[in-house]
């Protein structure tokens, strides 16, 4: 990482790596599964460990496995605006939260998950309590394993947009939800501020898809429900 220039791609072979605590360059980090979706037949992984990483610029991860350590581990806590986070064909596992927006009034920037798998995300994939307006949040063709949401939080939402008056739109399209969250208190989506557009997804044996008190900001279109108990 230290030798890379902004805009370059670091290509990893299979093995174990650790991210530095501060990443200030806008780069792409690509692994041996760059062209293989997370639910496909993959080669041996490039496994990147990291916790509380501060990103000074936009970042892309392609075809790697990102791993935390336990239910107290956050991948990154975002404290400023104008950052783009892109994860394509990645496996993400063992994080309390992947992306937390904890600074007030964050705007601009984007989050994209495409072809990824989320496995043992204990509380939040995206915690957006202070997002004012991101240009986009897109979760496309991803798989949510049946072992997420293990930390009980009745107001959580695996993806939570919780800033009153926010205009961010989160689009969730073509995703597969393989089962209910581990804690029955938790839900997949919560929108106090901002909205969700959820379409062409498959919910398999899922209960409590949305947080009940604010489900009107969450729109469902052309989804499939197999033995799913209820939206709320």
Image (spheres, helix red, strand yellow):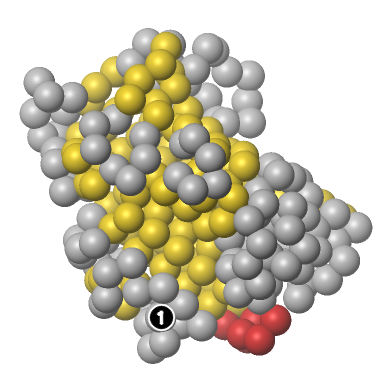
User: Is residue 147 depicted above or below 11 in this figure?
Assistant: below
Foreground residue, 81 or 22? 22
Measured from the top left, where is residue 71 in percent x and y? 55, 46
Measured from the top left, where is residue 6 in percent x and y? 10, 34
Q: What SS does tag 1 mark?
A: loop
If the image is split into quadrants, where does the N terminus sit?
top left
Badge 1 crowding class, 10 Å Cα cut-off, few under 14, some 14 to 19, many 20 or more, is: many
Measured from the top left, where is residue 54 in percent x and y? 24, 47
Q: Residue at x 14, y 38 (%)?
A: 25
If the image is split into quadrants, where does the C terminus sit?
bottom right
Disc 1 target residue: 163
Foreground residue, 129 or 139? 129
**Picture quadrant where residue 39 is located:** top right
Question: Left of 215 or right of it: where is 23?
Answer: left
Measured from the top left, where is residue 106 in percent x and y? 26, 71
Q: Is residue 191 visible?
A: yes
Question: Left of 77 or right of it: where is 127?
Answer: right
Foreground residue, 46 or 120? 120
**Picture quadrant where residue 187 is located:** bottom right
Q: Residue at x 77, y 72 (%)?
A: 231
**Picture quadrant where residue 198 is located:** bottom right
Q: Residue at x 52, y 57 (%)?
A: 124
User: Is residue 216 depicted above or below 38 in this figure?
Assistant: below
Q: Residue at x 45, y 45 (%)?
A: 73
């Amino acid at each position: 990482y230290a030798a890379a220039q902004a805009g370059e791609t670091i290509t990893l072979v299979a093995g174990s790596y650790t991210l530095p605590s501060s990443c200030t360059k806008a780069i792409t980090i690509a692994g041996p599964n760059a062209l293989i979706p997370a639910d496909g037949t993959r080669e041996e992984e490039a496994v990147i460990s990291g916790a509380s990483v501060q990103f000074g610029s936009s970042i892309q991860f392609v075809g790697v496995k990102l791993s935390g350590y336990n239910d107290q581990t956050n991948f990154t806590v975002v404290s400023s605006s104008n950052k783009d986070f892109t994860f394509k064909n990645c496996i993400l596992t063992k994080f309390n939260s992947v992306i937390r927006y904890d600074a007030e009034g964050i705007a601009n920037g984007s989050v994209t998950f495409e072809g990824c798998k989320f496995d043992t995300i204990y509380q939040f994939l995206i915690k957006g309590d202070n997002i004012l307006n991101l240009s986009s949040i897109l979760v496309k063709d991803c798989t949510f394993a049946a072992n997420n949401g293990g930390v009980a939080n009745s107001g959580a939402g695996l993806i939570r947009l919780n800033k009153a008056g926010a205009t961010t739109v989160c689009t969730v399209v073509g995703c597969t939800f393989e089962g209910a969250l581990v804690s029955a208190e938790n839900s997949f989506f919560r929108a106090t501020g901002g909205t969700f557009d959820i379409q062409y997804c498959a919910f398999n044996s899922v209960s409590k898809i949305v947080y009940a008190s604010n489900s009107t900001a969450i729109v469902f279109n052309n989804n499939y429900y197999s033995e799913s108990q209820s939206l709320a």
